[in-house]
């Protein structure tokens, strides 16, 4: 168990930017900007981009970022529907409670959150909601877990993965990043096989239209139409990658060095979402 966890988390740590020594905003002073971005999602209701970070959840629109949720560390973050978010992570300074929040849910676009399950028992560093099912990677145990009711959970495997994405067509087909390379599962994540055609990546995403995107530990973005296809090299991010999301074959989002970037040409070029 410990070996699997070390392998899975080692790849993530290698790809994340180092936090600067800014004062925690929960202590009374706001962080000057988003830092240590863990997850990116697009609200299908209004198209706004959200970033789950070490200093809270931010809504990015019209070139500005606004913190919309209480300050806590959103380690895992995913959009489940319009204004409907799921997350995992840790409470902010002085908030009390267990060190890991388990699975939390917001139905008002991140303004308020409710703990659903596994508080103090799971620390989700990757989450996805698809096919009326939650998939979560628990960094405390290295387990890949699934739930159909957000309350009871089934352990699927303890594969040494860093990030994963679920097929929009089949709930049993997943891709996952590992130190050896991209892997693919056809049995819901119970077992994975190496995808020989793909480069080693740290983050991966699978859009509703079937397009895939991934980013290597040194920031090179790749795309593909199917996991087993040849992956096409696209843009290189300016800095180590922190998160990645793909909304469609043309819309790709990434984070590097505390900056959220957007591409509207399938990852060929990226521009900052925030006004400089």
Image (cartoon, rainbow, N blue to C red):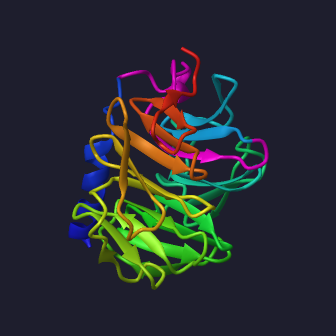
- Tell me the quadrant of the picture where the N terminus can be found: bottom left
The one nearer the camera, 89 or 229, is 229
Residue 30 place in picture, x, y as percent: 55, 20
Residue 48 is left or right of residue 182, and the answer is right
* Residue at left offset 35%, top offset 68%: 142
* Residue at left offset 44%, top offset 63%: 164
Relative height, residue 169 to residue 59 (above, below) = below
Relative height, residue 183 to residue 43 (above, below) = below
* Residue at left offset 54%, top offset 14%: 276
**Residue furthest toward the top?**
276
Residue 49 visible:
yes
Residue 21 is left or right of residue 3, and the answer is right
What is the chief secondary structure element of the magenta stretch? loop
Residue 44 place in picture, x, y as percent: 73, 50
Relative height, residue 130 to residue 91 (above, below) = below
Magenta residues span 21-46
Q: Is residue 87 magenta?
A: no
Image quarter for residue 189?
Answer: bottom left
The one nearer the camera, 25 or 222, is 222
Residue 67 is left or right of residue 224, and the answer is right
Residue 105 place in picture, x, y as percent: 68, 56
Residue 5 is left or right of residue 156, and the answer is left
Residue 75 visible:
no
* Residue at left offset 29%, top offset 68%: 160
Q: How many marks?
A: 0
Q: Is residue 39 magenta?
A: yes
The one nearer the camera, 97 or 6, is 6
Residue 194 place in picture, x, y as percent: 28, 73
Relative height, residue 254 to residue 25 (above, below) = below
């Amino acid at each position: 168990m410990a070996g699997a966890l070390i392998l899975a988390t080692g790849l993530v740590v290698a790809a994340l930017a180092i936090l600067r020594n800014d004062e925690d905003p929960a202590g009374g002073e706001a962080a000057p900007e988003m830092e240590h971005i863990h997850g990116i999602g697009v609200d299908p209701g209004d198209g706004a981009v959200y970033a789950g970070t070490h200093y809270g959840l931010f809504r990015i629109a019209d070139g500005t970022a606004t913190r919309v949720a209480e300050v806590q560390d959103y380690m895992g973050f995913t959009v489940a529907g319009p204004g409907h978010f799921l997350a995992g992570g840790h409470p902010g300074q002085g908030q009390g409670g267990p060190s890991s929040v388990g699975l939390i849910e917001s139905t008002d676009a991140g303004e308020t959150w409710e703990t659903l399950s596994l508080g103090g028992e799971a620390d989700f560093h990757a989450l996805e909601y698809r096919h009326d099912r939650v998939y979560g990677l628990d960094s405390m145990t290295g387990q890949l877990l699934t739930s159909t009711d957000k309350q009871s959970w089934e352990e699927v495997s303890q594969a040494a993965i860093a990030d994963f994405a679920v097929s929009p067509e089949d709930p049993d087909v997943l891709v996952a990043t590992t130190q050896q390379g991209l892997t693919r599962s056809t049995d819901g994540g119970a077992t994975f096989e190496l995808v020989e055609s793909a480069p080693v990546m740290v983050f991966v995403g699978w859009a509703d239209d079937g397009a895939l995107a991934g980013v290597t530990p040194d920031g090179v973005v790749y795309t593909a139409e199917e996991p087993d296809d040849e992956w096409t090299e696209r843009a290189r991010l300016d800095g180590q990658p922190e998160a990645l999301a793909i909304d469609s074959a043309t819309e790709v989002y990434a984070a590097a060095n505390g900056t959220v970037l957007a591409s509207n040409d399938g990852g060929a070029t990226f521009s900052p979402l925030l006004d400089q």
